[in-house]
Image (cartoon, rainbow, N blue to C red):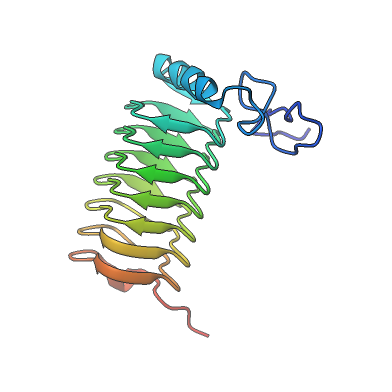
């Protein structure tokens, strides 16, 4: 028996290869009213404590409050989040690849085996969080804070980090290979146990 984490259906547009949004026949690009779909999905999440296998890829979310929610196997790939609160939320195997985060709050979150690869994060807070085995590869991160967080075995390979703090963090086995860094602080973090260069 083959177990699949997702049960997403394909978009009803026959020329489209994207999965349909949860509760809709079309993806975000082909939905008749993407804003209404974002509102509907946001309402569903706001009313639930645990959210599983939701596909909300490509939608725009502004001013949402998902504080304390539990997300499992969800896809938000390509979505835009502004003024969004995820404080104290739990994420397992969730995808935020190629997203944009503007002035968002992920403080005190518990995120494991998730991906934010290729995303843009600005003025976003991850303070006092558990960010274990998280993929930040290829991200552009500016004016963000990861202070007092555990980033064990996470990846920032090829990322661009600007005016961002990793103060008093656990960065054991965290990869910062080929990152571009400007005004980045690792004060009081265990940098000797992180990987900044690959030895050949």
Q: Is residue 173 visible?
A: no
In this view of the protein, which residue sits in the foreground, 179 or 72?
179
Residue 45 is at least partly visible in this image: yes
Q: State the residue at coordinates (29%, 58%).
A: 170
Image: 80 above or below 166: above
Q: Residue furthest front?
A: 32
Residue lying at 60% horizontally and 31% vertically, measured from the top left: 28
The quarter of the rendered structure image containing the N terminus is top right
Residue 67, horizontal then vertical, whole percent: 32, 27
| Residue 171 percent across, percent down from the top left | 33, 61
Q: Residue furthest top?
A: 47
Q: Which of 147 and 189 lies nearest the eye of the viewer?
A: 147
Which residue is situated farthest in the bottom direction here? 200
Q: Going 36% across and 39% down the picture, which residue do you hit?
A: 110
Quadrant in the rendering for residue 78? top right
Indicate the quadrant where residue 128 lies: top left
- Residue 11 lies, in percent from the top left, at 72, 29
Up/down of 62 relative to 48, above or below: below
Measuring from the top left, give residue 161's x and y in whole percent: 35, 64
């Amino acid at each position: 028996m083959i177990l699949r984490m997702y049960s997403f259906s394909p978009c009803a547009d026959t020329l489209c290869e994207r999965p349909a949004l949860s509760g809709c026949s079309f993806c975000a690009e082909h939905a008749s009213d993407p804003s209404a779909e974002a509102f509907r999905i946001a309402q569903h999440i706001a009313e639930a404590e645990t959210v599983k296998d939701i596909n909300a890829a490509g939608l725009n979310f502004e001013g949402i409050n998902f504080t304390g929610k539990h997300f499992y196997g969800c896809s938000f790939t390509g979505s835009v989040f502004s003024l969004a609160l995820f404080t104290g939320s739990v994420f397992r195997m969730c995808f935020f690849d190629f997203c944009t985060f503007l002035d968002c709050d992920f403080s005190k979150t518990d995120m494991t085996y998730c991906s934010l690869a290729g995303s843009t994060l600005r003025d976003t807070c991850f303070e006092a969080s558990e960010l274990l085995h998280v993929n930040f590869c290829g991200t552009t991160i500016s004016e963000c804070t990861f202070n007092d967080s555990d980033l064990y075995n996470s990846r920032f390979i090829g990322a661009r980090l600007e005016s961002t703090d990793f103060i008093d963090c656990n960065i054991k086995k965290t990869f910062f290979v080929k990152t571009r860094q400007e005004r980045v602080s690792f004060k009081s973090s265990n940098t000797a146990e992180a990987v900044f260069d690959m030895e050949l």
